[in-house]
Amino acid sequence: MSTPALDTQPLRQDEEKRTPDRSYGYRRGRRVDALTAAAFLTPGMLAFALFVILPAVGGLVLTFFQWDLFGAPRWVGLDNIIRLFGDAEMWQALGVTALFVLMGVLPTILIGFVLAVLVNTKLPGIAAIRVFYFAPMIASAAVSSLIWVNLYSTNGLVNQALSWIGVNGPNWLSDLTWARPALVIMMIWGGLPLVIILYLAGLQRVPDDIYAAASLDGASKWRQVWSMTWPNVWGTTVLIAVLQAVSFVSGSFEIALIMTDGGPLGSTQSIALYSYKVAFGQRDIGYASALSLFQLVLMIAIVVLVRGIVRFRKERS
Amino acid sequence: MRTPRSHSVLRYLAIVLAGLVMATPLLFMVSGSLKSAAEINAFPPPLLPETPIWQNFVEAWNYLTPRVILNTFVFSLGIVGLQLVLSLPAAFALAKIPFKWAAAVVATLVVPLFIPGNLTLIPLFVVTFQLGWLNTYAGLIIPMAAQCAFAILMFREFFAGLPVGLIEAARIDGASWGRVLTAIGLPLAKPALATFCSISFLTAWNMYIWPQVIAPNPANRVINVALAPLAGGENSMISPSVGLAGAVIAMLPVLIVFIVFQKWYLKGIVGTGLE
């Protein structure tokens, strides 16, 4: 396939600004462009329509049906949505989801920030050492579950470490009180690498000269970090807060499914996991879709809330 | 007063110590994978095995089966390859071929980036199920490869940065758009390709929930689906150290890709975070 040189000539003029050139060559060039663009876009857009747009719309539509995947779907109107509010298991799952976020996001941000400041240096060999900091990111849910199940076992490394300071550790994953914090600690570990990477990128943009004045004033390094570095990466912090909140809402469900199956007594069953079980355990596709929709509303609420807090802080300062 | 030298030694120590704490679970995985059944259940647990039991890896390999490993490679490389096919031409068209609806297409592509994958898991499963793709490679690969909005937008941004003159010159010389893409666009896109392929491969290799719901059959299982039951304590026939050996096997390919492509991978991660 080759295009005569003539056709491309008016195309350049078009780049500058739509010239009202309606010559034969111009129109043919435009048509070749449009056809080629269509051909280039078709495979990607077909896949996108079938497996992204259709499921997004479908998820919404399924909320209004009762369906077990095999029979004919039955229209039930708003029943599934009304059912949400009277469902005790949903409220418990909502509570678990909120606790995951409340217990997880802040520690991940603070620890991640401190670690990023720590490794933000040009000491020799730092690139190799950073791999240790980033490595948890590439452990899959199944791999990290295999590891942490062993760490949390009654004889595991965690209880061993606790016994050094005289604490008799629980049987973490089957303990009603400790199963949830156990998963949160594990998720913090898995989430830290991304937070460190984003902070490292943020720290690159903090100008060095702000520290010079502080050093002269005799401010300690630790003080400088919190009164100068921290405010300077505020934008990164907001981004990380949103990403982490979303990941604690939805990302918690794979490891909970693998390690505790939501137990003991639903204490680690988030909305995402509940929705998964309703869909693939009970095959109640309509209600599972309603739960997913509810989760989406929740996430949008979090994003709006974080943005609101950011704006509030800006107005006050 | 501390000298700058002693200061940097202290900092060095802190960095190494914190790094060791971060890496403890992974180091434990490696050490545990070589422990005997008695050592892995002992209290207090020994830091290192007395004699490394390589037999654990043989048993893990036998439990996983070569079929599962092959499936995982087909699945991951299939997703990377298909995403390239779907996204490269589309991205090039959006960046460099002048046509009417480019802006509208880009706007449509941006929307799903903000919807986490597990929210559309159920309807995506329904679509794939209706196509009759349960327990097939097509069902495993195509719906995941189709989540390529990120790839299209990333490559579009890269192509948009290519100098216009270069492409015009080729067009004036009579090169078709397809030829401009393959002869000019792709060779210049090597850094973007390295970023994309490493991220896409790692994501695909580590997927659990999609292969679990769409291909639970032993013949189509991928490594994470095969390993997950070992962490839930459902399979007490397998020693925990064999499970950890399986985890090491599952992590090796991604670790190698991560170390080799680290520079490009991290660049991509930062780029997506900043959007």
Image (cartoon, rainbow, N blue to C red):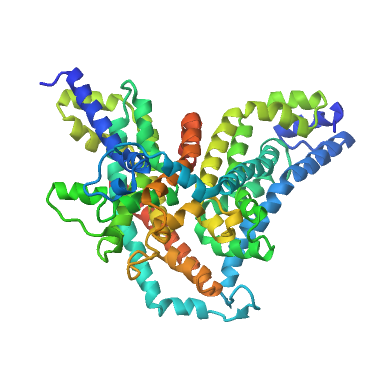
Percent position of residue B65, x then y:
55, 48
Q: In which quarter of the image is the N terminus of chain B?
A: top left
Decide if residue A76 is in sight here.
Answer: yes
For this orientation, the residue located farthest to the right is: A24
**Is residue A317 found left or right of A24 in the rendered image?**
left
Q: Which residue lies furthest to the left in this view?
A: B1
What residue appears at the point 30 percent right and 35 percent down from the top-left corner? B19
Whether residue A279 sits left or right of residue A309 in the image: it is: right
| Above or below for A187 versus B27 | below
Q: Nearer the viewer, residue A107 or A255?
A: A255
Quarter of the image where one finds residue B195: top right
Q: Which of A312 and B55 is in front in this view?
A: B55
* Identity of the residue drawn at 33% across and 59% down: A100
Observer able to see residue A310: no
The total number of labels drawn is 0
> In the figure, B179 relative to B69: above or below?
above
Q: Is residue A25 left or right of residue A101?
A: right
Q: Dividing the picture into quarters, in which one does residue B20 lie?
A: top left
Q: Where is residue A205 in the image (x, y as percent from the top left)?
A: 38, 31
Q: Residue B240 in the image: x percent, y percent? A: 37, 51
Q: Which of the 4 quarters of the picture holds residue A210?
A: top left
Q: Position of residue A182 (x, y in %)?
A: 29, 56
Residue at 34% across / 65% down in the picture?
A: A96
